[in-house]
Image (cartoon, coloured by chain):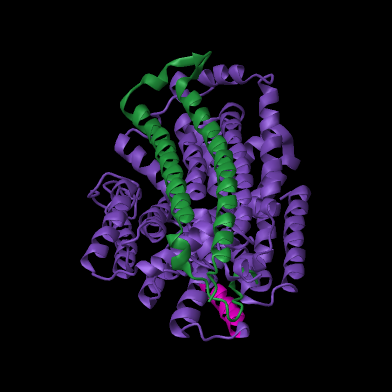
Chain colours: A purple, B green
Amino acid sequence: MSFTAIFFFVGIVGLTLVITWWASKRTSSASDFYTAGGGLTGWQNGLAIAGDYLSAASFLGIAGAVALFGFDGFFFSIGYLVAYLVVLYIVAEPLRNLGKFTLADMITARFDNAKVRGTAALSTITIVLFYMIAQLVGAGALIQLLLGIDYWIAVLIVGFMMTTYVLFGGMTATSWVQIIKACLLMLGTVIISFLVLKEFGFSISTMFKEMTTVTDSGAAYLNPGLKYTNGLDTISMLIALVLGTAGLPHILMRFFTVKDAKTARSSVIWATWIVGIFYVLTIFLGFGAAAFVGKEDIIAANAAGNMAAPLLAEALGGDILFSFVCAVAFATILAVVAGLVLSGASALSHDIYGQIIKKGKITEKEQVLAARIGSITIAVISILLALGAQTLNVAFLVSLAFCIAGSANLPVIIYTIYWKRFNTAGAVTAMLTGLISALVLVAMSPNVWNPVEGKAIFVGDPLIMLTNPAIISVPLGFLGGFFGTLLSKETDDAKYREVDVKANTGISVQDVSH
Amino acid sequence: MGNNQAKKGIVIDYDTIANQESFKSLVRRKNSFLWSMTAIFLSAYMLLPILTSYTTILHQKAFGEITFVWIYAAGLFIMTWGLCHLYVAKANSFDREAKAIIAEYENGGGRR
């Protein structure tokens, strides 16, 4: 490991620790811990959303996928971006107007029931754990590759860092780690993209023209079909991407860190522009890697293509740019896992302990203590699972998380806000149907079963051919909520009118008290 | 601490607001805007994998070696940014209406 690499890594670790120290002095209430006291501005929260959302899978995974499969790799970029419209149009504002810390808060604004809250917390924790294991296993493999240290040490380093941010600095520290990471990531991506364009004489059409000859796929590289050959599976994957984002707990949680719906809106604008520009640039990262690193070298470094972007940085910018990009990848992982720990802890400590076990009768001091214990619990469980999952192919864990989020969380969010007849039984059945069907369908899929030994977890024929079952499980989640509602006679129109008024006007007691 | 600090003695009568004609009209127009736009952008988005999986229309060259599938993808990016700003413009006008609705409720003596 070179001197510049050590310099960048130490710089990032040092900077984030200073932020954590500064944030720890400002974290005294539960609201500070979970939502930074609701005090972030629009651009801050927008950058933090982008920093939370652009995981290593986006940065390293999509660059690698575009490098290896051309347009098919770019499908993810499109799905992840358009997903923001679902968040903005359907979910963000009502959630902000009704909730306090978590998704369960929003649903129980209508149904005051421990079962509803418990089920929402269960689905949140499931999504967080799957997502987290994927991030940690990926992080371990990456740091092992970059720094040459053992996998288990790498996982422990990341685990220790994320726990430190959350434990001492709560959402304030986590948000600033995400903001800094978003800036560094954009800087690195813009520099590499500029260098790639320069190699092609600043001509996009020259770049596309050259891409038809540099890979062994020829002109087919610029068209879909290299990776995804099963139409239904492609469609299903794109459904999971576009609908799953709106149900991801760590993204939803970011809407509670601003003071009102107007600020929530402006933060999504910031996030959409940053995330969109980033995903446009993944074309340059991918094409550049294919042209200037070459498929063989990319696969030799990592079979999934995860090293494409760092190798491209090295090819065009030498040791300094390579070290910088590696440090950015490290910061990316830290920012995302810290956000995940917080959303898992909020479900565990606020929903299950504070609201269900203690029935809301809990002092401010106990809430903060519970939040810290919950964070440690989530961190320890995920670190242990990640240490055991080293050899697992983790790409499907991420798609599973998106699939559960779209199947279990999105239907209940939409029904809660927009369907008058919806009731407690419907909320529970919607979440359970979505959660269970996503899990069962993935357990029967080619991710888990493959006739060739070593390609999946078990040897055997998959029962369904879909790698991502969203096309089945999302409708099942909606149907589950629909029939669950009709099977129960319970209705409460007055409560719905209250939720409707709150969601649409953002009214609070302060508005009428002057 | 935000919105959750309830001031004593003030209860909002949600039923009164929900029954105001102005509120009903806002919700109707808001929902029809939100859901019709959602239907449009989701259709535009889902059409891409359908076209690429079952036809080769988008495989044809548009400019030089750039095929139509890239143009379509670029279109989805521009659509996302555009609809994002359209939403905010609309939401700001809905906000003003919501304020007027709350004022109407206050003037109507909705306090108990």
Is residue B45 something one can see in this rendering? yes
Q: Quadrant of residue A123?
A: bottom left
Residues in magenta, as a range? A366-378
Question: Residue A262's spot in the image, x, y percent?
Answer: 62, 53
Q: Is residue A86 magenta?
A: no
The correct choice, above or below, for A510 with respect to A41 in the image is below
Tell me the residue at 43%/22% (across/down): A220
Horizontal side of B62 relative to A1 (left or right) equals left
Q: Say which of B90 and A404 sits in front.
A: B90
Question: Residue A440's spot in the image, x, y percent?
Answer: 28, 58
Residue lying furthest top: B64
Question: Residue A451's spot in the image, x, y percent?
Answer: 26, 47
Quadrant that contains the C terminus of chain A: bottom right
Horizontal side of B81 relative to A479 (left or right) equals right
Tell me the residue at 73%/68% (across/down): A23
Give the number of callouts: 0
Q: Quadrant of residue A197?
A: top right
Q: Say which of A256 and A196 sits in front.
A: A256
Is residue A163 something one can see in this rendering? no
